[in-house]
Amino acid sequence: MSTAGKVLVVLVMLVMVGWIVLISAVTQLNENYGEIVAQNDKKLEALSEDVAKTTRDIAATIEKANREQADMIRDLREVQARIVAFERHQSAAIESLTRLKFQVTSYESGLQTALKALETRKAEEAQANETLAKKKDEIQKAKEVNADLRDQLAKLQDEFKQLLSENRNELSAPKSGAAPRSSRAGRAVPSL
């Protein structure tokens, strides 16, 4: 064999050994990568399960949050409805209170007017009683004067009747030469 053939054989042998080392290294790497891929697959499955669980948890949390938000909105609407009802009630109470204050003011004004009218009526009554007492005194005095005048009238009527009867007697008596005597002579005529 020629030297070139020997060199070529040695080179092929060396390349073969290199290829065997390379193939064994590649095989070793494939085994290592296979284990790493298997581990990564397990990790991927675990992560996928975690993602699915987390997704379910997130969905449950979102659903729970939505329910709580709906409950909160419902409670808020109920509170708002109560507030509106309370404000209506408060407005009605304020209106009623204002109406009652106006009525109280009106009644107080009416009471003051009535009290003034009562004072006026009492003053008028006192004045009327005083005037009535004066009139009663005047009537009593007038009755006394009337009684005196009636007594005088009765006396004058009696005197008049007596004089009338005397005058009739004198006229019916026989006429003689002497002048008739007046019974009025010496009598005083009472003054009124």
Image (cartoon, grey):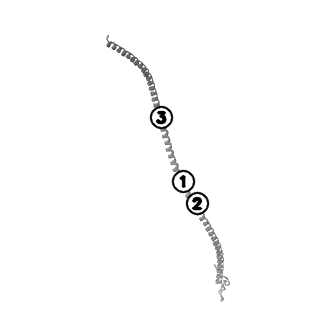
Given contact means CB atoms under 8 Å apart, are the residues at marks 1 and 3 in contact?
no
Can you tell which mark lies on residue 2?
none
Label 1 to label 3: alpha-carbon separation: 51 Å
Please give the name of the residue rendered at 52% of the width and 50% of the height, measured from the top-left corner. Answer: 94
Query: Which residue position is annotated with label 2?
Result: 115
Q: SS at mark 2?
A: helix
Label 2 to label 1: alpha-carbon separation: 20 Å
The residue lying toward the viewer, choosing from 42 and 32, is: 32
Q: Which residue is most to the bottom?
A: 177
Q: Position of residue 184 (x, y in %)?
A: 66, 83
Q: SS at mark 1?
A: helix
- The amino acid type, in three-letter code, at marker 2 is Leu
The residue lying toward the viewer, choosing from 136 and 23, is: 23
* Mark positioned earlier in the residue sequence (2 or 1): 1
Q: Position of residue 152 (x, y in %)?
A: 65, 76
Which circle, 1 or 3, is nearer the viewer? Answer: 3
* Mark positioned earlier in the residue sequence (3 or 2): 3
In this rendering, is residue 188 above or below 9?
Answer: below
- The amino acid type, in three-letter code, at marker 1 is Lys
Can you tell which mark lies on residue 65?
3
Q: Position of residue 186 (x, y in %)?
A: 68, 84
Query: Which residue position is annotated with label 1?
Result: 101
- The amino acid type, in three-letter code, at marker 3 is Ala
